Amino acid sequence: MTESYQMFPSIVAEVEQLTPLVKRFTFKRIDGESYPEFTAGSHMFVKMNDKLSNAYSLVSNAKDLSSYQICVQQEVNGKGGSTFMHEHCVKGFQLEISSPKNLFELSHTGQKHLLIAGGIGITPFMTQMEELAQRNADYELKYACRGPEYEALLNNLDKNIHADRIQTYVSSEGVFLDLDQLISQQPLGTHIYVCGPKPMIDATVEACDKYRHRDEYVHWEQFSSNVSESGNAFTVILAKSNHRIEVQHDQTILQAIESLNIDVECLCREGVCGTCETVILEGEAEHLDKYLDDDEKISQKTMMICVSRAKNKEITLDL
């Protein structure tokens, strides 16, 4: 079962425009205390108001907990969180920051670490590269982006340490990353990490499978849900509140429950945070989250109702 997140009332201490679409935000706790420790690749949640809460990778120095930093790209077709951050979260704005969570940890084994990033997907690698350098590990970063302005996201990295390990691919300049060729050149046993747009993640995973890299050596992260807009409708029975709810093909269980004014805690709505984990009493779930591990999904004991669905026509939950 998921652990509860601790929330910290915070203030926006600084806002920097890194690219036309990306801003870096620095937060400090209102009580003046330090934030919790975090490990490389960790994310946290920014709760902007009662309706908006998004997950973002931490890019700040893990040794300086007086503040947290994140980079946010404005997504015009997103759910509104990034636009709110860009338009309303000016210096002095107050919001809540969650304790950190890491679902994208670096492996402590393996002879080599290959990091593949696309656009704003560079963010979790900022802290990971620092850790890999401290380990004296063998690592490389392959960074694909639309335009040269995105290279500003690399400015936090110490060029004296990482310069020889970074290669960028700027599509507007006609330079593209060939994932199939890249993966084909990696020795088996290389840990391969990818974060970026879904097509990049899918292509990387497909290439890793093609060249026989074992699943445990392939790691990926994306803060967006896998909710299908063409899924089947089904019925949810809420055992505690004695409700039967019809969940439409383009609706999540969480949305259907909230339509009855039943409150369920959920920070992310993307299957990442785990706060909406709910016990399954009868039936099976089609798991679409990124929080439960494979064994937990197979056990069919709980599900994330913000993204996951019923496998069949009916499921009973402990709500």
Image (spheres, rainbow, N blue to C red):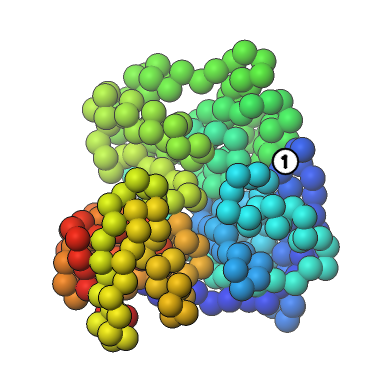
Q: In the image, is residue 31 above or below residue 111?
A: below
Q: Amino acid at mark 1?
A: Leu
Q: Can you see residue 83? A: yes
Q: Quadrant of residue 111?
A: top left
Q: Which residue does the image show at 46% across and 18% down from the upper left?
A: 178
Using a 10 Å C-alpha cutoff, classify the residue at mark 1 as few (fewer than 14 neighbours), some (14 to 19) or many (20 or more).
Answer: some
Task: Identify the residue at the far right of this view.
Answer: 91
Q: Quadrant of residue 291?
A: bottom left
- Left or right of 24? Residue 244 is left
Residue at the top extreme?
174
Q: Nearer the viewer, residue 71 or 142?
A: 71
Is residue 251 depicted above or below 230 in this figure? below
* Residue 307 horizontal side relative to residue 6, left or right: left
| Image-quadrant location for residue 240 | bottom left
Q: How many marks?
A: 1
Q: Is residue 60 visible?
A: no
In the image, residue 306 lies at what x, y percent? Answer: 40, 63
Q: Residue 137, image x and y in percent?
A: 46, 38
In the image, residue 247 sits, relative to residue 261, either above or below, namely: above
Element type where label 1 sits in the image: loop
User: Which residue is painted at 34% across and 53% down in the image?
Assistant: 249
Q: Check the picture and name the quadrant holding the N terminus.
A: bottom left
Picture coordinates of residue 3, whole percent (x, y)? 40, 75
Query: What residue would you read off at disc 1?
Result: 21
Q: Residue at x 48, y 49 (%)?
A: 224
Where does the image place residue 217, in percent across and percent down from the top left?
Answer: 31, 39
Q: Residue at x 39, y 28 (%)?
A: 203
Q: Quadrant of the C terminus?
A: bottom left
